[in-house]
């Protein structure tokens, strides 16, 4: 069970790493656009406006991706916590059952 959880965590970590790489790539593109704007390499006002519109769109996309990712992680965390609580309850139940069987066995032994 523990190995299964660790495997799931490793898979999630890999997915998270891939998403972070996408975020980083978008960030680098945005930085490059900003460098072009700041360096004066772009003289055409319309082109600058188009770049800013694209930058704004990408920023909005990035914010949405981050929100979706956070929601996904929260759901996965809740699922893991639910699984942990369920396993804990099962363990308590099994322990109580084992203790009850042991008590019955002791009583039967005492009666014999």
Image (spheres, rainbow, N blue to C red):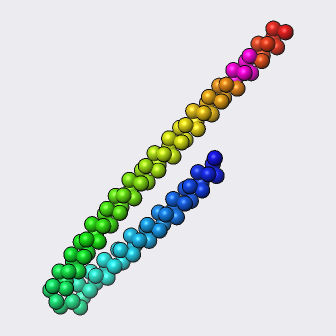
- Tell me: 15 left or right of 100: left
The span picked out in magenta is 99-104
Q: Magenta: predominant secondary structure element?
A: helix
Picture quadrant of residue 102: top right
Residue 49 screen position, x and y as percent? 17, 80
- Residue sitting nearer the eye, 33 or 47: 47
Asked if residue 11 is positioned above or below residue 83 in the image, the reply reads below
Residue under the point 43% across and 49% down: 75
Asked if residue 27 is positioned above or below residue 14 in the image, the reply reads below
Picture quadrant of residue 108: top right
Residue 42 screen position, x and y as percent? 21, 89
- Tell me: 21 left or right of 52: right
- Tell me the quadrant of the picture where the C terminus can be found: top right
Residue 110 screen position, x and y as percent? 81, 11
Picture quadrant of residue 36: bottom left
All told, the count of numbered labels is 0
Residue under the point 65% across and 25% down: 96
- Tell me: 70 left or right of 41: right
Q: Is residue 101 magenta?
A: yes
- Tell me: 74 left or right of 55: right
Residue under the point 46% across and 45% down: 78
Kindly give the residue lying farthest to the left in the view shown.
45
Residue 31 screen position, x and y as percent? 31, 79
Kindly give the residue lying farthest to the top in the view shown.
111
Q: Is residue 85 magenta?
A: no
């Amino acid at each position: 069970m523990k190995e299964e959880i660790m495997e799931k965590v490793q898979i999630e970590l890999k997915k998270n790493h891939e998403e972070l790489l996408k975020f980083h790539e978008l960030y680098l593109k945005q930085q490059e656009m900003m460098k072009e704007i700041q360096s004066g390499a772009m003289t055409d006002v319309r082109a600058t406006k188009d770049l800013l519109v694209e930058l704004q769109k990408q920023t909005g996309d990035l914010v949405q991706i981050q929100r979706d990712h956070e929601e996904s992680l929260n759901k996965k965390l809740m699922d893991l916590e639910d699984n942990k609580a369920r396993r804990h309850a099962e363990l308590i139940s099994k322990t109580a059952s084992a203790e009850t069987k042991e008590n019955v066995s002791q009583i039967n032994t005492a009666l014999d």
